[in-house]
Image (cartoon, grey):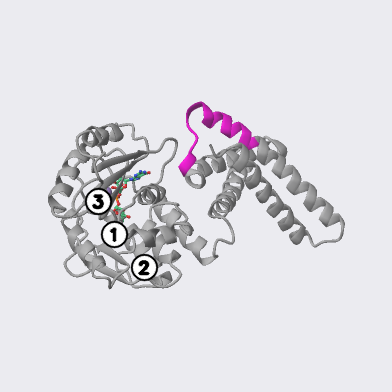
Amino acid sequence: MTEPPASASPTLSVVVPCYNERPNVGPMLAKLDAALAGITWEVIYVDDDSPDGTAEEVRRFAHTDPRVRCIRRIGRRGLASAVIEGALASSADYVAVIDGDLQHDETRLPAMLAALQGGGYDLVVGSRHVEGGDATGLANRWRHLISNGGIRLAQAFLPVKLTDPMSGYFMLPRPLFERLARSLTGQGFKILLDLVLSAPAPLRVLEIPVRFRERVAGESKLDALVLAQFGGLLLDKVFGGLLPLRFISFALVGALGVIVHLTVLTALRQGTGLGFEIEQAMATVVAMMFNFALNNAVTYRDQRLRGPRLWRGLLLFMLVCGLGAVANVGIAQVLYERQMAWSLAGAFGAVIGVVWNYAVSATLVWRAR
Ligand code: GDD
Ligand code: MN
């Protein structure tokens, strides 16, 4: 066996989360190769089993280029968790995170690296909102609104100044990432915010301007849910992980379910003559289906049920919540009989019901695989 080189691990690992980015893989690798001349680097694609065969495409290049690596996750979705796993698979001195759709300007990577190697900074962020950067690539007005609203919300909570806290383009020393990794929630899109909020002492951040290019191939995965998830991330950080993020989401969905229930009930009362019992039962079923669908899409977005498992899940969910309702009413009844004020007894029953529904559906309906 020949001696390995003095340092066998690269200086820089470029982590690329990707979902359905097949046509962008080849062009991205060529761009990285050109931009990173003179630096020892590797690229770690983290693919969530994209149906378009992104992982296969990455491996095709990996075949002839050992700097190209691929992590393929099955049964999971999520940008933040993909980034975390990619970064944790690195042994390099520095880790960069960049989108796999060519929207981030990779020619800034050497400048970002140089800034970190200078020792004055813990984190370098590619920002669209500092002098020289621009956000023309954001798809439409709606995206601008989400983006700007989110930025303002974030800045109110941030320990350091970030003009573009939603950026998915940044670099930091790998050992620092590893120190912070345990505190990351790994939920949603906003891994940069998660990092900044998880650091025990404010990070020394340098922002460098980047152009945000138009997406050429494939489509954006960012939708309106992202803002909701992002609010959840802030809540989680503010409450110091007191309540699990999922529980908060589950409870909020439940609250919306009550509104749906009352709306349906009102409509049935006015529009049909079925009698209160039947109308109440119908409203309950509609609200349960609504809650199930929303929990499946938001609360358990990362392990969303589909196909036959969706129907099985719905059935189980209705059974679980049915029992939860019985527990709720039973407990409230007992408390009320023991002279507790009706409002307090009712609230107690509701809380017990939500906790029951959450605990049981988390293990039975959306069982962690
Ligand atoms: N592994 C994995 N799993 N990758 C994902 C997932 C996922 O569930 N969802 C998205 N990605 C990848 C995409 O393939 C792309 O490489 C990158 O993450 C960014 O996703 P886009 O869908 O292209 O995001 P965008 O262009 O709308 O959002 C950009 O702006 C946001 C701020 O407004 C990105 O730069 C985000 O990182 C940034 O937060
Ligand atoms: Mn994009």
Q: Which residue is mark 1?
A: 170
Magenta-span inclusion, residue 180: no
Find numbered disc 2 in the image and state the secondary structure of the residue it sits on: helix
Answer whether residue 193 is visible to the viewer in this image: no
Identify the residue shown where x is 77% and y is 57%: 345
Residue 146 at x, y percent in the picture = 34, 58
Q: Which mark is residue 240?
A: none
Magenta region, residue range: 302-318
When asked about the image quadrant of residue 59, the answer is top left
Identify the residue shown where x is 18% and y is 53%: 213
Identify the residue shown where x is 49% and y is 63%: 237
Q: Is residue 250 left or right of residue 25?
A: right
When asked about the image quadrant of residue 212, the answer is bottom left
Question: Which amino acid type is marked by label 3?
Answer: Ala
Q: Is residue 362 left or right of residue 12?
A: right
Question: Which amino acid type is marked by label 2?
Answer: Arg
Q: Quadrant of the N terminus?
A: top left
Question: Which amino acid type is marked by label 1?
Answer: Phe
Residue 175 at x, y percent in the picture = 37, 60
Q: Which residue is mark 2?
A: 152
State how far apart marks 1 and 2 are (Cα). 20 Å
* Label 2 Cα neighbours within 10 Å, binned few <14 / some 14-19 / many ≥20: few
Q: Is mark 3 within 8 Å of ligand 1?
A: yes
Task: Tell which of 219 and 255 is nearer to you.
Answer: 219
Q: Which mark is residue 139?
A: 3
Task: Tell which of 125 and 131 is nearer to you.
Answer: 125
Task: Tell which of 131 and 28 is nearer to you.
Answer: 28
Residue 119 at x, y percent in the picture = 27, 71
